[in-house]
Amino acid sequence: MPAALVCVDQVVTRFGRTTVHDGVTLEIGAGQVVALIGGSGTGKSVLLREMVGLQRPTEGRVRLFGEDIACVDDERLAALRTRFGMLFQDGALFSSLTVAENVAVPFREHTAFGTGLVAALVGLKLALVGLPRDTLVKMPAQLSGGMRKRVSLARAIALEPEIVFLDEPTSGLDPIGARAFDRLLRTLADSLGLTVVMVTHDLDTLTSIADRAIALHAGKVIADGPVDDVARSRHPWIVEYFSARAPRRSGDD
Amino acid sequence: MNEVAPPSLRWSREADGSIVLFPAGSWHLAESTAVQRELAEAPPGEGRSFVIDGSALGSLDTFAAFELLTFVGRNGMPVDGVPMRAMHERHRRLVTLVADRLKAGCAVPAARRLRFVPRIGAAAIGLHEMLLAHSAYVGHVAVELARLARRPTTFRLREAVAQFEAVAIDAIPIVVLVAMMIGVVFAYLLGVQAQQYGATIFVVDGVGMAVTRELSPVIVAVIVAGRSGAAFTAQIGLMKVQQEVDAIRVLGLSPAQVLVVPRLAAIVIGLPLLVYVGDLAGIFGGAAISASQLGIPFRTFVTRLHSVLSMTNVLVGLGKAPVFGAVIGLIGCRMGLSVSADARSVGVNTTSTVVQSIVWVFMLDAAFAVTLQHLGW
């Protein structure tokens, strides 16, 4: 059994008087597609930010690749950061750079490759996420939401990360675009051997591509396991969550 | 497992002349130099067919697959459909995926860069278009003002007052400081010259006229251009980027009424008041340095000022201020509304607002000086 890539240990997070996490503990191993679910305001995105070291938990530890991300020095942190990628909710592309330049940023910052090789790799990454060639010279503002997410994913996987963290990958996409993005994620996860950790509200994403679901509620993990097992949980919030989309019928059963 | 072993490449020649590549170890971006070196030392098999044998391959990522396939492609073999044997299922899928995408072509078109002369031409055309758009915008705002004049109740007093506070009230300390320093410098330099002729008392005439007519209006306008003009552009520009301006429009409001008119009102009213504050501070600075360095008592300074400073000078100075204010406000708001949807353009437009405003202030000031001279004011 390989060591866990992400290890969250008794994390407590407070903003002023509000307690967002009240002792969250979980482990994520290699090669899984893990979905964090929970209602709005249950701190899913905050947990994600704590996993990548953008935010410090009030108490407890978060270990990424076995290292406590809140305590490592800047050099180690920079090295760790080349081993994971992050997709922000709205893509967070650099608005003053073209699509190709956006994806080239990690190569320029972390490798010594020449212009030609970088251009070829950028082209490859964008092809991997299924973008047509004419998008390369466009500016992020000229792209649709789905395309921006694809570009952002290409940037996130540029340096061959072991993990990608995704914050609501399918929010703001139409159902067709969202399912296409799901398939893309699954393909990449399978062929690149990526570990995917995502925050999602999308039941379809959850049931179609996630191997495992972790449900947060009231600052705790209330369910953790294969999606089907979690869906069978008797916890009232989970019952409500999984029935939120069920077709309503009139009359009796 | 060979997961952590450095990448290496062996090869062998088959009986049918094809070359079998045996990549081994960890073929990963982190080992990019080793991967490239191994491939550079591989046999140039021009026109030969390659087979990839994955039996010793520890790990593979898209970068290494790309390099491997590029090597094969360089030797004249199509990158898709390279025969593979003894490959781990995951590696096979990865190579196929990369080959697929490579075939689709992934060269990045290079961006075009202008040379020196075309760049001057482009800048000239850009300036021309900007000035045209400015004059069109003046017309647009005039129409909005006329609309406001017909329905004065739609004026957003609360927003105008908030802007007035930011433009005028908050600027008082810096205006006082800068104007006073200018008064000090001007009186001192003038005094040193005048002393040679024993005519130090004329320093009062000079300071009074220079500060009220020229120095205070221009200095205050430059300060306000840097503070408020830039703020207008940055605020409105960010609102534009975040589609707040569109939201205003969709709610049936006019961005000009909501954003531009209150700011214009604030700056047109605020600037003369600041100039007046600057007048007082500049004269006070001049009087202070005259008392301490030139031997003109404060009381004498004031009496002399009272008899020599004509009202015309003060009014000309105060009269120029609203014009400067209107120009700064219009440029600031228009540059904000013409921000395109990216972060860089907010910066570019903010810089442009300050530069344009200052240039316009000095050009208008020169025009005022010449015109008013001819009018005998």
Image (cartoon, coloured by chain):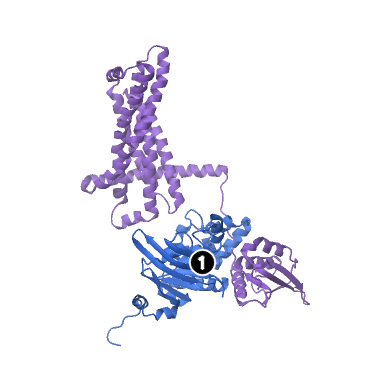
Chain colours: A blue, B purple
Q: Position of residue B48 (x, y in %)?
A: 74, 71
Q: Residue at x 42, y 16 (%)?
A: B193
Describe residue A14's horizontal placement relative to residue A183 as left or right.
left
Front-lying residue, A117 or A111 = A111
Q: Chain of mark 1?
A: A
Q: Residue at label 1?
A: A164
Residue located at (62% from left, 63% from top): B29
Q: Residue at x 40, y 49 (%)?
A: B338
Q: Is residue A23 above or below residue B337?
A: below
Nearer to the camera, A227 or B74? A227
Q: Is residue A155 left or right of residue B308?
A: right
Q: Position of residue A54 (x, y in %)?
A: 46, 59
Q: Is residue B347 left or right of residue B302?
A: right
Is B301 left, or right, of B151 in this rendering?
right
| Dot 1 alpha-carbon crowd within 10 angstroms: few under 14, some 14 to 19, many 20 or more | many
Residue B189 percent coordinates (x, y):
42, 21
Quadrant occupied by the C terminus of chain B: top left
Q: Closer to the camera, A152 or A69? A: A69
* Quadrant position of residue B326: top left
- Rendered position, B171 above or below B9: above
Q: Residue furthest top?
A: B198
Residue drawn at (56%, 49%), measured in percent from left and top? B113
Residue B225 in picture, x, y percent from top left: 38, 39
Which residue of the protein is positioned furthest toward the right in this rendering? B15
